[in-house]
Image (cartoon, coloured by chain):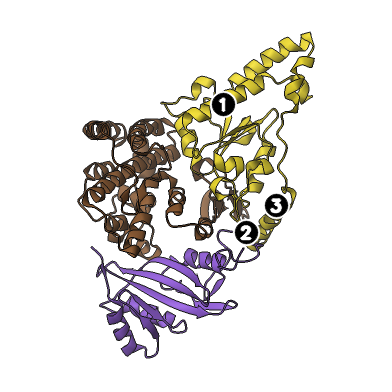
Chain colours: A purple, B brown, C yellow
Amino acid sequence: MTVALKGEDVAKKLGEVFPGAVVASDKVVVVVDSQHLYKVAEYLKNTTGFEFDYLANLAAVDYVDYFEVVYHLTSLKNNHSLVLKTRCYGREKLTVPSVYSLWQTADYQEREAFDLMGITFTGHPNLKRLFLWEGFEGHPQRRDYL
Amino acid sequence: MAIKTEPFILNMGPQHPSTHGVFRMRVTLDGEVIVGLEPVIGYLHRGIEKLAEGRTYIQNMPFTDRLDYVTSMTNNLAYAMAVEKLAGIKVPERAEYFRVVIAEMMRISSHLMGVGFFLNDLGAMMTPVLYMWREREKIVDLFEMLCGQRLTYNYMRFGGVSQDVPEEFWPALKRFVAEMPKFIDEYEQLLSLNEILLARTKGVGILPSDMAVKSEPAGQCCEPAVLSGTCVALTHILSMTDLISMSRWGALGTAMTDTW
Amino acid sequence: MEIDRYKIDLAETERIEKLMKKSQRPIPDPDDWLEEELKRNILLTTVDYVADWARSRSTFPLMFGLACCAFEMIGTAASRFDVTRYGMDIFRWSPRQADLMICAGTLTWKMAPAVRMIYDQMPEPKWVIAMGACAVSGGTFRESYSVVPGINRIVPVDVYIPGCPPRPEGLIYGINKIQQKILKDSIKNYQ
């Protein structure tokens, strides 16, 4: 059975290594600032004790004041999982660093988030629309579409 | 004298016999060897998430049926379990066990279809599909006894199932479970030593474990790797069993997958 | 010579947008010749009868399953609800060899130019069955931003089969209806 790591413990450890990165933490979730996201993800992937080598899910959520990108990470070696979140504020020109170089599965999932929510992932090799055709105007999954 | 060649982009369009639904591939060919492939998807993007925004939780249950229409009960179950976790609803024990039984039956039927269409693609035109469909019809009859539908069931509710099991279900299920191993033996006899099948699948499409972890396939992608003898141990692929982490009535289901 | 993939994507966008603009109203159903059976003369009637009888009993359906209804279509073709007994033995994959297009499943705007292209590639005489609620009118997904509200915006439809998904018996009833419709047809319509 995969153990879900406690968000607060992970947040404490991350706070020692990257001061100022963790914005909030919960029993399950760690929320990280979007500028530190890539370094935190790299740390979570490569350090012994965490070794999150499997990105199970990447999703984007639209709370009206901010957008949130949610990463469900799992470690196959240590058999534990974690939920990592990052936020970007505003409605236009949203950028989040891409984690494609760490987990290849982020390729299509980030394209989906870009297509449906309009979040741009910097460093993504091929960021174009996935489900809808190129000339489609707007990002349908946003709260203010239709 | 070398002949000048250049790679050729061929469009295996959205309607194609082997795409099983709509899926487009832009294939870069060098002669007859595929050197690059770019999948283009979105031909069945119905905007279910957007439609679900304007409906209540229970009104979204039929939408989950249509996400993966091969295993609709399991999608219903996943959605029901997610909502129950959020709302803290406790499911009675009988319902829990029964939902596992249904999910396993659904898994058997979907594996039957998967095997049938896999062989269809390998060249055996429709014969394996007809054989597998025979058993699938039996399972679908059982489901029709429960909820009246053959494909998109909408049977799970938050806190259990929508209606209780009719009397004739349990004897029918027992009959099915008793008969099924005989059919699996029949398939094994037809397929395991089939020369064409072995020639076309042995050693083909081996997914080495490091590439598998890097690109994180889900579900049936690891089947061909098992076929060719390389066992890729991906414990997290079975994330469905994380959800349905109760007593396994799935002896029949694993027997089916183990025919490979 | 490197082919620009972005140009291919833009060309697809152009096709989709053009088709969207053209498909604002549904195409009227091809029914108006059904009343004219009384006007046939005697000589053509025998030829018509034989031709229609032959055509209706040996239609080659085109396998056009888009979504969930495709599974009920395959179920109809399987051994329990046999559709071979109606002459539809082999489901053709290529539109050039088919004359009945059974459109089963939800049609999205992205897929619509492909459907139109396939319909145009079928040789005359051809018929279209819209199977399932999504093909008839958009179904549950009618209000979505990317779903065509009924395939009769893109191709003219002869028989509509409601249901979600329609049972195999329902599809067989639809096939009976289209056989009756073909029997009323006349070779004058194709000259």
Classify mark 3: residues with Cα within 10 Å, few (<14), some (14-19) or many (20+).
Answer: some
* Badge 1 or badge 3: first in the primary sequence: 3
Q: Position of residue B252 (x, y in %)?
A: 24, 41
**Which residue carries the number 3 mark?**
C20
Tell me the SS state at disc 2: loop
Residue drawn where x is 49% and y is 68% of the image: A110
Q: Nearer the viewer, residue B199 or B121?
A: B121
Chain under numbered label 2 = A
Q: Mark 1 and mark 2, same subunit?
A: no
Tell me the SS state at disc 1: helix
- Residue B150 in sight: yes
Residue A89 vs C172, above or below: the answer is below
- Residue C2 in sight: no
- Disc 2 marks a residue whose amino acid type is Trp
- Disc 3 marks a residue whose amino acid type is Met
**Which residue carries the number 2 mark?**
A133
Residue B179 vs C110, above or below: the answer is above
Q: Position of residue B86 (x, y in %)?
A: 34, 64
Residue drawn where x is 50% and y is 79% of the image: A88
